[in-house]
Amino acid sequence: MLDAVAAAAKAAGREPADVTLVAVSKQQPDEKIDAMLATGQHVFGENRVQEAQGRWEARRAGVELRLIGPLQTNKVKEAVALFDVIETVDREKLARALADELARTGRRPRLYVQVNTGEEPQKAGVAPAETDAFLALCRELGLTIEGLMCIPPEAEPAGPHFALLARIAARNGLSKLSMGMSADYETAVRFGATSVRVGSALFGARG
Ligand SMILES: *Cc1c(COP(=O)(O)O)cnc(C)c1O
């Protein structure tokens, strides 16, 4: 898979080193996680705080752990303690809770804002039209946002959603884009993804 991501980068005229493979380990058995660690893969994504705590507490050394699922404010403390990157900052209440927890602990997880590019009611994320204002609010709260993240609608071509995310990032001076999953990581790399979140194509179907 690392080779496939590197090939996608080269095909897009980009440096393979500029695209990080995030191995999405949610709902995968420990044997597969340990086998993946043994290959040297060290960046992993999880979508639930509690599940990640159970899986990673004993495997944390040398691993970069990213939260890629929705974060409830009552889990902010645990999330800030566990994750190196939180990709799903998506509302004012959460931004304020994160700002308080960072001030309290001095921890500095890298932060991404999730954008609901398809404006799907069931999906988390800031609406595209509200993202500039939300980023400004994060800055006012003292949060440094590293980039943007999106999950395009399943039934639509992903390209336009990746292009939209890239445009919003560019006009806000953000250089990091978390986009692309098993089915569309090559497209995402073409549209400028700096990290792709790949689960089933890497580990097999989830349990
Ligand atoms: C589960 C998940 C992925 C990985 O999905 P695959 O299709 O298995 O690659 C990527 N991003 C997010 C936010 C996820 O929840």
Image (cartoon, grey):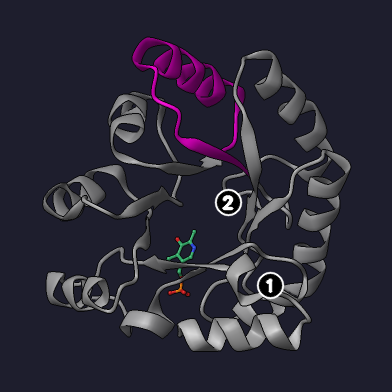
Q: Judge from the rendering whether residue 157 lies leftward or rightward of residue 203; answer left or right.
A: right
Q: Image point 84% across, 48% down: which residue?
A: 170
Q: Image point 41% across, 48% down: which residue?
A: 67
Q: Position of residue 73 (x, y in %)?
A: 41, 25
Q: Is residue 201 above or below residue 144?
A: below
Q: Which residues are magenta?
A: 89-113
Q: Is residue 154 magenta?
A: no
Q: Judge from the rendering whether residue 23 lies leftward or rightward of residue 124; answer left or right.
A: left
Q: Amino acid at mark 2?
A: Lys
Q: Quadrant of residue 112?
A: top right
Q: Position of residue 24 (x, y in %)?
A: 38, 66
Q: Position of residue 185 (x, y in %)?
A: 60, 77
Q: Is residue 145 visible?
A: yes
Label 1 with label 2: CB-CB less than 8 Å: no
Please give the residue where the numbered disc 2 appears in the rendered image.
123
Q: Judging from the image, what secondary structure is the residue with disc 2 in?
A: loop
Q: Nearer the viewer, residue 27 or 57?
A: 57
Q: Judge from the rendering whether residue 177 lies leftward or rightward of residue 64; answer left or right.
A: right
Q: Which mark is residue 115?
A: none
Task: Determine crowd level at label 1: few under 14, some 14-19, many 20+ residues with C-alpha closer than 10 A.
Answer: many
Is the C-beta of the residue carrying label 1 under 8 Å from the nearest atom of ligand 1? Answer: no
Please give the residue where the numbered disc 1 appears in the rendered image.
188
Q: Judging from the image, what secondary structure is the residue with disc 1 in?
A: helix
Q: Is residue 156 visible?
A: no
Q: Image point 56% across, 81% down: which residue?
A: 5
